[in-house]
Amino acid sequence: MNFTAPDPRFKKEGSTELPGNYHGGDPSGLRSDALDGTPGEGHYQDTGCHLQPSCLNCTLPQCYYDVPRNQARDTAIYKLVVEKKVMNQTVALEYNVSTRTVHRIVQKGRAR
């Protein structure tokens, strides 16, 4: 692999910013260590979420983003596929999700 070649995915006209809030690495847009560097060499801003100003000082027992948000949807999808034998493609269209999401929900439900 050539890690010093320019990466066109992140090179924007007139901009040297990298995606997200990553500020480490080579500002020229080269991949040398900008995306594949040693962990800890970059600077990540701890901006928290809308509930807490900082992740490192968070008082919640579980991260807001780790809590499942679609339990009712997942339960309904699982029941349609497993109990009512509705095809995955039909369920995916009805709930506006991918068939892979339906497969994942069914597998997670069977593991319980």
Image (cartoon, helix red, strand yellow):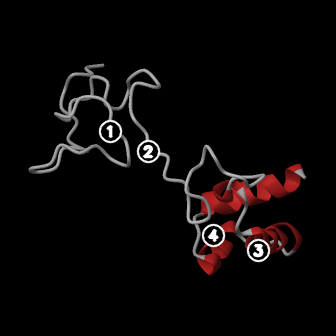
Q: Residue at x 38, y 23 (%)?
A: 37
Helix, strand, or loop for circle 2?
A: loop
Q: Kindly identify which residue carries mark 1.
A: 23
Distance between mark 4 and mark 2 Cα atoms? 40 Å
Question: Sequence-wise, which precedes: disc 4 or disc 2?
Answer: 2
> Horizontal placement of 38 versus 92: left or right?
left
Residue mark closest to the camera, 4 vs 2: 2
- Mark 1: which amino acid? His
Question: Marks 2 and 4: in contact by CB < 8 Å?
Answer: no
Marks 2 and 3, Cα distance to the nearest angstrom?
Answer: 45 Å
Name the residue that disc number 3 marks.
Answer: 86
Q: Quadrant of residue 87?
A: bottom right
On screen, residue 62 above or below 86: above
Q: Which mark is residue 89?
A: 4
Label 4 – label 1 distance at C-alpha: 41 Å
Q: Would you place residue 52 above or below residue 84 in this image?
A: above
